[in-house]
Amino acid sequence: MVLRVLCTGSLRICPPYAHFNFMKNWRSAPDSYLQLLPYLEFYIVAANDSLSFYKEQLAGETKNYIHIRATTDQMTPVDMLRRVADEVLACGERVELLIGDDAQLMGIWRSFEHGVLEFHVKTQRYQLAGLTFGS
C-alpha cells in the first residue's frame, strides 16, 4: 500500500469510484457489499496501473508502480505487468466468489468492471484504442 502511495496518484483518485456504486440508501444495511469494497478498490487501482503502462512506456516513464515493483522483485517491467494483470484477474474472480448468487450485486460488479476497462480504452490519454491484438 505504501508503495502505491509513493508512486501513483491513482490510490487517492480511484477508490472513490468503487464506493460510488453503492448509493446511500441502496440497501437497508451495507452488510451485503461492504466486504467487496477493498477488492473493488484494489481492482480499479491495479487495473489503472496495468492499463497506464503502455502510455508510460511510450513516454519513457519509469517512476510508476510497475517499474518500481519490478525493480523491487528483480523482474522485468513486462513480467511485472503480467503479474499485476494476473492479480487484477484474480481479484475479479474473488469478487465473483464473494458475490455468489446475488444478481443485483453481480450487475453492479459487471458494470464497474466494464466501466474501468471502457474508460481506459476510450480515453485518448491511455493510447489504447489503436492497439490491435493477435487472434
Image (spheres, grey):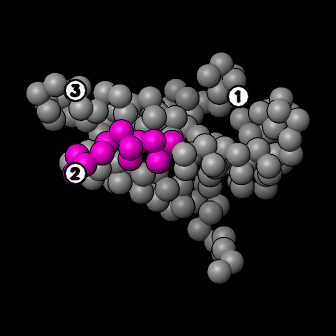
Q: What stretch is highlighted in magenta?
A: 91-103
Q: Which mark is residue 7?
A: 1
Q: Is residue 102 rendered magenta in the image?
A: yes
**Regarding mark 2 in the picture, which secondary structure is present there?**
helix
Q: Earlier in the sequence, mark 3 or mark 1?
A: 1
The mark found on residue 103 in the picture is: 2
Residue 133 colored in magenta in the image:
no
Q: Is residue 123 left or right of residue 65?
A: left
Disc number at residue 30?
Answer: 3
**Mark 1, secondary structure of its residue:** helix
Q: What residue type is labelled 2?
A: Ala
**Other residues around mark 2 within 10 Å, as few (<14) / some (14–19) / many (≥20):** few
Does the rendering let one see residue 125?
yes
Which of the 4 image quarters holds residue 69?
top right
Q: How crowded is the residue under tag 3: few (<14 C-alpha within 10 Å), some, or many (20+)?
A: few
Image quarter of the C terminus:
bottom right
C-beta proximity under 8 Å, tags 1 and 2: no
Mainly helix, strand or loop, the magenta region?
helix
Q: What residue type is labelled 1?
A: Cys
Residue 12: image location, x then y, percent: 52, 26
The residue lying at 83 percent from left, 32 percent from top is: 73
Image coords of residue 126 (percent x, y): 62, 55
Q: How far apart are marks 2 and 3 (CA)?
A: 16 Å
